[in-house]
Amino acid sequence: MTVNGIYSSMAALLEYPWDDIREKAQGCLAAVEGPSLQYPSGVPEELKAFIKEASEMPLDDLQGLYSYTFEIAGGETTLDLAYHLYDGFKRSNYLVSLKELYKAKSFPFAEIAKGELPDHLPVVLRFLDILDDEGLRREILESFVIKGMEKLAKNFDISSSKDSPYRHVIKALWLVIDTDIKRKAASESEQQ
């Protein structure tokens, strides 16, 4: 499991928002500012910006913005990561492989996903948080998640959702994952 369940905390911010979204954001902020984690200052800054912008709008507006940003605006800002990386059958095959991996690792996909596809970012993050195979976690982060996140973050900058408060969560998460990958690589090179 990752330190302090940061991936699950970030996943909670990328799920459809309810009354507790601000508390979830505060909890996530507390987790990344904790003394055991050393994330770049951009991570808490982005989360604080999300909290500020989300707090300035009624929940109904935030829910509408979430739906527009991740579901209506088209594929450019979808949270289904394989959409950003693969086309057609290649994406279908990846989804099947991911679902088989979840089953092999006893991940309660149907319960967690609640109808979302296996490549849905919050689902993948929750899986990574419970995965006890560090090598497999790193492989998924490096070969799939970070690449999808890079494209998603770029798409936010050029899309009609570029002013969405959720851009801050995407940027914060990208920084967290990038830092984790670099930290693990540095740790491995020190051990050699």
Image (cartoon, rainbow, N blue to C red):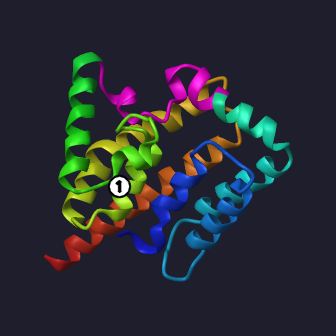
Which residue is identified by label 1?
127
For the residue marked with disc 1, what is the amino acid?
A: Phe
Q: Would residue 173 be counted in the magenta stretch?
A: no
User: Residues in magenta?
Assistant: 68-87
As drawn, the residue found furthest toward the top would be 88
Which residue shows up at 71% across the image and 63% down it?
23
Taking the image as shown, residue 56 lies to the left or right of residue 7, namely right
x, y (%) of residue 146?
Answer: 37, 46
Frontmost residue, 61 versus 191: 61
Which residue shows up at 30% across the image and 25% down it?
86
x, y (%) of residue 183?
Answer: 35, 68
As drawn, the residue found furthest toward the bottom would be 35
Frontmost residue, 39 versus 55: 55
Does the magenta stretch mainly form a helix, a strand or a loop? Answer: helix
Taking the image as shown, residue 74 lies to the left or right of residue 25, namely left
Q: Is residue 170 above or below residue 163?
A: below
Q: Quadrant of the C terminus?
A: bottom left
Taking the image as shown, residue 60 lies to the left or right of residue 113, namely right
x, y (%) of residue 155?
Answer: 53, 29
Q: Is residue 4 above or below residue 44?
A: below
Q: Is residue 117 above or below residue 141?
A: above
x, y (%) of residue 180?
Answer: 38, 63
- Whether residue 189 appears in this view of the structure is yes
Quadrant of residue 145 within the rendered picture: top left
Dot 1, crowdedness within 10 Å: few (<14), some or many (≥20)?
A: many
Which residue shows up at 61% across the image and 59% down it?
42
Which residue shows up at 43% across the image and 43% down it?
113
Frontmost residue, 1 versus 190: 1
